[in-house]
Image (cartoon, helix red, strand yellow):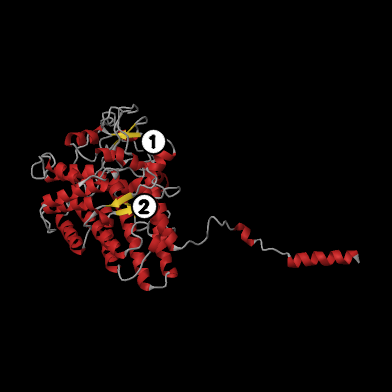
Amino acid sequence: MKKIFISIMILFCLGACRKDFTNLNIDPKRPRDVPPSGLFTYAQRRLSNTITSSSVNLNIFRLIEQYWQETEYTDESNYDITTRPIPDNIWNALYTDVLKNFEEAKKKIPTQVANVTVQKNQIAITDIMQVYTWYYLLTTYGNIPYSEALNIDKPFPKYDDAKTVYNDLLTRLDADIAALDPAAGSLGNADIIYNGNVNSWKKFANTFKLKMGMLLADIDNTKAQSIVESAMSAGVFTSNADNATFKYQVSPPNTNPVWVDLVQVGRDDFVAASTLVDNMNTLNDPRRPLYFRINKAGTFTGGKPGEKSNNGSFSYPAVKLTQPEYPALLLSYDETEFFLAEAVERGYNVGGPAEIHYDNAIIASINYWGGSAADATAYLANQAVAYSKASGTYKGKIGNQKWIALYNRGWDAWIDTRRLDFPKLTAPSTAVSAFPVRLKYPIKEQNVNGVNYSQAAAAIGGDLVITKLFWDKF
């Protein structure tokens, strides 16, 4: 009887206590399916981090633009971009983390969003973010994989002509603007920049269109004028309230990357560069205490580009820049007004004299950084700043002041320095090359996608940091 009871209990356990072990191969921290909103937010964050980072392994444009100088290790200040795989890291971040995730979001939106109009808004905003990302790849490298990129069936994508890609991006941007319907919703709080406000995205897209149009001004003035005037008539940024800011949080992991690079890891790798600080001192610029801390002597001083600057006599970046919640700025009203000042000088019909737009840009910059109206008035009264009295060409006046205003946005400053040829930045005497006007292609591309890489390098005139890109011919 005892044996019979034991047998019955075994059978009971086998039946009633049977477990499904098939889920053991599923990692709950790595879901098989992700909603498009999650993909969008992740890609938006990675884009913002890449554009904003101060890591010498990724974003060295504050050093190239001589805003900051390194305290101990000076490779990047001397234009060494290959000892650390900087071109590879930028390429990987923008293609893999940003563009690919935006692309997957666009594919998933129609399958998970029922309202057709909301679908269209979400897809258009996601595509605007992709156009924005492609812009930085094109202006950094030149010809790049585009038509065959993001396609798993094309592991060795061809490189497309940069100018052809740029024109296609403008076509995409126009289609996105036309698709946006402010009467319907979009991405809601999955969108960290505008919280899904479609009107704000429409204005962003037109402002970015203005920016893209101005990049072509030196090589195709007629086309640039048409793009700029079209964007202006549709509505661009009109105040700092329109700025595209990515809002970081106080606690990790969603914190300001500059805080991560400097404070969280306890490093003092950067001080002000003398190029910027000396210029601001000469102009008595009210933004100095907003950009930098005073040194031990109570003044603002910077290290010489390319040289070690590890003593206490130099100014460090302002504390607020290194706060964990300090936001990133992806597109701004002050740069918009600088573009409009330039557009007036080029004869474009955008309204108002160049001086008004120039003044508006400077006032907006000072206000954004926390300066007062009185600060702005006094600064614009300086004869070396006043548009009608300052010496030089319009490119010089606008270029120099825009460079100051774009502090903390080294990548954008680098684009404008190449485009306007101002300010005139002198390469350090110890630099490994002349001032870089592009980054070299990634080593990985040379090794893995060699045939297409070689064709691309030949097409642009050589894979060199001194090879000018299609829009930078003067």
Q: Is residue 103 above or below residue 454?
A: below
**Residue 444 at x, y percent in the picture:** 41, 45
- Asked if the residue under mark 1 is in contact with the one under mark 2, i.e. CB atoms within 8 Å, the reply is no
Q: From the image, which quarter does the C terminus lie in?
A: top left
Residue 2 or 179: which is nearer the viewer?
2
Relative vertical location of residue 145 with respect to residue 185 in this rendering, above or below: above
> What label does residue 247 carry, if any?
2
> Which corner quadrant holds the N terminus?
bottom right
Q: Mark 1 points at which residue?
A: 83
Q: In which quarter of the view is residue 36 placed?
A: bottom left
Secondary element at image label 2: loop
> x, y percentage for residue 67?
27, 38
Asked whether residue 218 appears in the rendered view, the answer is no
Q: Which mark is residue 210?
A: none
Question: Between residues 315 and 343, which one lies in front from this camera angle?
Answer: 315
Q: What element carries label 1?
A: loop
Task: Identify which residue is drawn at 38% across, 33% down.
Answer: 268
The amino acid beneath tag 1 is Thr
User: Left or right: where does residue 386 sit relative to residue 405?
Assistant: left
Q: Which residue is drawn at 44% across and 69% down?
A: 111
Q: Is residue 413 visible?
A: yes
Find residue 99 and report its horizontal and vertical position in percent. Answer: 38, 55
Instruction: Inspect the image, locate mark 2, and give the three-letter code of the amino acid beneath it.
Output: Lys
